[in-house]
Image (spheres, helix red, strand yellow):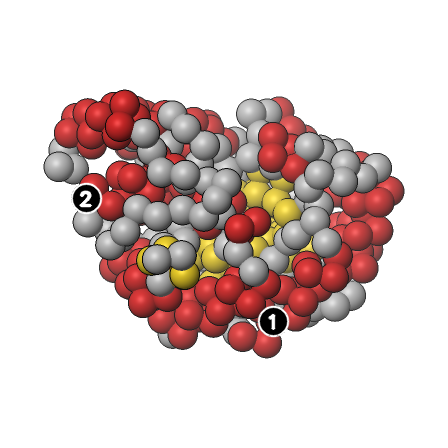
Amino acid sequence: MMDLPKDFLRGSIPPLITPFRNGTVDFTAYAAMVEFQIAEGSHGILVNGTTSEPATLTVDERNRAVDVAVEAAAGRVPIVAATGSQSFADTEALTLHAEKAGADALLIVTPYFIRPPQRGLAAYYLELAKRTGLPWMIYHIPGRAAVNVTLETLCEIADKAPNFVGMKHAVDDLGFVSRCLARLGMDFRIFVGLEDLSYPMMAVGACGLMNAVGNLRPARLAAMCEAVWEGDLGKARDIHYALFEINQAVFYDTNPIPIKYMMKKVGLIPENEHRLPMVPALPELERRLDGVLERAGMV
């Protein structure tokens, strides 16, 4: 595994939503979201993660989002580009563009729908690793991709691909995190992908968060990470519980339906718009989310 700077690729790196306006991506609003994240103290930006509805975007749109994020950040925080797709060709094209555009690292989801065997996953990632010099991580989200990555597969990839440096783990399995770190070392970057596990997973060694709620409360997530680094687990736990209801609210419907509604409600995005088959929140959900925002003191 390549030797990364201690402060690189850790902390709160929120997966930004994709703002739409009249059916097209609103890249002006996207650049403003990057500025908001930096002002709020986020430690990086994740482009084209699950929360961005990437399966509804074209390859060109995903590439343009990376361009805009890199330009807007201007080197102030790392840009992590999520370049995975179910197609190897699309993943390769997205990966090559992200590196050329100036992204600092890659997050590559397990190919979804296909349900490949472990040997297929290993071959897929090892072939991609030959095509980039950037540090890259696996995005492990079997709830969406319908495939798990085993510890043995992670170890095989780590043995053969020096630029493989970590994983976003969106699975309710703390034990797996401990086993990974015990085998691959504490420098192996594991990011939390489920809001409920933010504090406990960091307490056992995860390096940071890639959580949808970071679109809404970035400063609080950054503060939680920093409290853990400072050894103040009590403060980190308090932040965890202060965010508990809003963390739950993110999943009152399919992500990012609730988060987009709440962002529009508090003025973080100009429009609450999705692309089919994703749709906006229903009135009943809107009322429920209004209550969450009121109790959080955000409206």
Where is the C terminus found, in terms of image quarters?
top left
Mark 1 lies on a secondary structure that is helix
Q: How many marks?
A: 2
Q: Nearer the viewer, residue 232 or 129?
A: 129
Where is the N terminus found, in terms of image quarters?
bottom right
Would you name the residue on which mark 2 appears?
266
Q: Residue at x 49, y 69 (%)?
A: 64
Q: Residue at x 46, y 65 (%)?
A: 65
Residue 110, image x, y percentages: 69, 44
Residue 99, image x, y percentages: 60, 71
Are the residues tagged 1 and 2 within 8 Å (C-beta)?
no
Disc 1 to disc 2, how far (Cα)? 34 Å
Say if 66 sits above or below 201 in the image: below
Q: Is residue 10 visible?
A: no
**Disc 1 residue type?**
His
Q: Nearer the viewer, residue 179 or 135?
A: 135
Q: Is residue 94 left or right of residue 264?
A: right
Q: Nearer the viewer, residue 276 or 56?
A: 276
Which of the marked residues, 1 or 2, is nearer the chain's N terminus? 1
Say if 296 sits above or below 155 in the image: above
Q: Residue at x 66, y 52 (%)?
A: 85
Q: Residue furthest right?
A: 119
Q: How many C-alpha atoms fall within 10 Å of the one at disc 2: few (<14), some, or many (≥20)?
A: some
Numbered circle sitting on residue 97: 1
**Disc 2 residue type?**
Val
Say if 290 sits above or below 49 in the image: above
Residue 5, image x, y percentages: 53, 62
Mark 2 lies on a secondary structure that is loop
Residue 66, image x, y percentages: 49, 66
Numbered circle sitting on residue 233: none
Q: Is residue 62 visible?
A: yes
